[in-house]
Amino acid sequence: MRLFMIRHGETQWNKWDKMQGQVNIPLNKTGEKEAGKLAEILQNKKFDAIYSSPLNRSKETAEIVFGNNADIILEPLIMEMAFGIYEGFYYGDLDIDESHDLYDYFYDRANYVPLKGGESVQQVANRAKKFLENMIVQHQDETVVAFSHGAFIHCAISVVRNLVPPQQGLIRSISNCSVTVFNDNNSGQFEIEQEAIDVIRGETLIL
């Protein structure tokens, strides 16, 4: 099967460098335009199933791409990583040194320990692994699209490439509305066919 995993369009919190996690932030106008451009790119591509994180920014992106009447399956497994008390935290222009709770998340993710209400990288990787396994079982020989989030997609790529704990420098930046394509080539095990293709800024996605 082929699985197209897409990060949602821009939100105001993306623009303001605030950690969103599982806070239900909607798309902003830029995000809506990005989703519209993505719709043009995917307009002639047939998908057998459409999945989305239940969070509005992903669901809204899916609805703009495929229409409000599309059959979109809301899947909690592909929600964004939870950051607990740091959801809403502004990290732009801040000097996050080794004494800060989030230092390891940004600079040494393998050793990141979440605070109350947050998830570890391994917990998100476990969710990603479960979702990928489900896709292979449920959609053999099909093409599926799933709208999700940056940290989650990063973990999904890490799982497939055996980079758990993740090594940030070995995975491309997951831009808004970027597309990552997983393909099991009928082997029952995913490989990365195309990684974090930034279609909004002109990179070419092979459909």
Image (cartoon, rainbow, N blue to C red):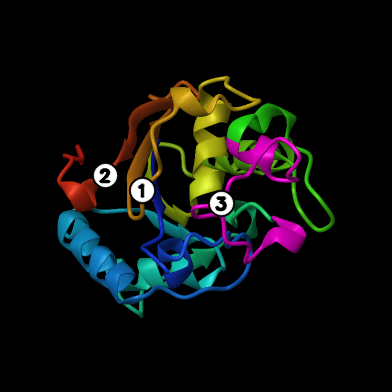
| Whole-number angstrom distance, CA of label 2 to CA of label 3 | 27 Å
> SS for tag 1?
loop
Label 2 CA crowd tier, 10 Å (few <14, some 14–19, many 20+): some
**Mark 2: amino acid:** Asp
Q: Nearer the viewer, mark 3 or mark 1?
A: 3
Q: Distance between the residues labelled 1 and 2?
A: 6 Å
Type of amino acid at the residue the image marks with label 1:
Ser
- Circle 3: residue type: Leu
Q: Is residue 96 magenta?
A: yes
Is residue 14 toward the left or the right of residue 77 in the image?
left
Which comes before the other along the chain, label 1 or label 2? 1
Q: In this view, does 80 lie above or below 160?
A: below
Residue designated by label 3:
94
Give the spatial CA distance, label 3 vs label 1: 21 Å
Give the image quarter of residue 106.
top right
Q: Are marks 1 and 2 in contact (CB under 8 Å)?
A: yes
**Relative depth, front residue between 60 and 16:** 16
Q: Is residue 17 magenta?
A: no
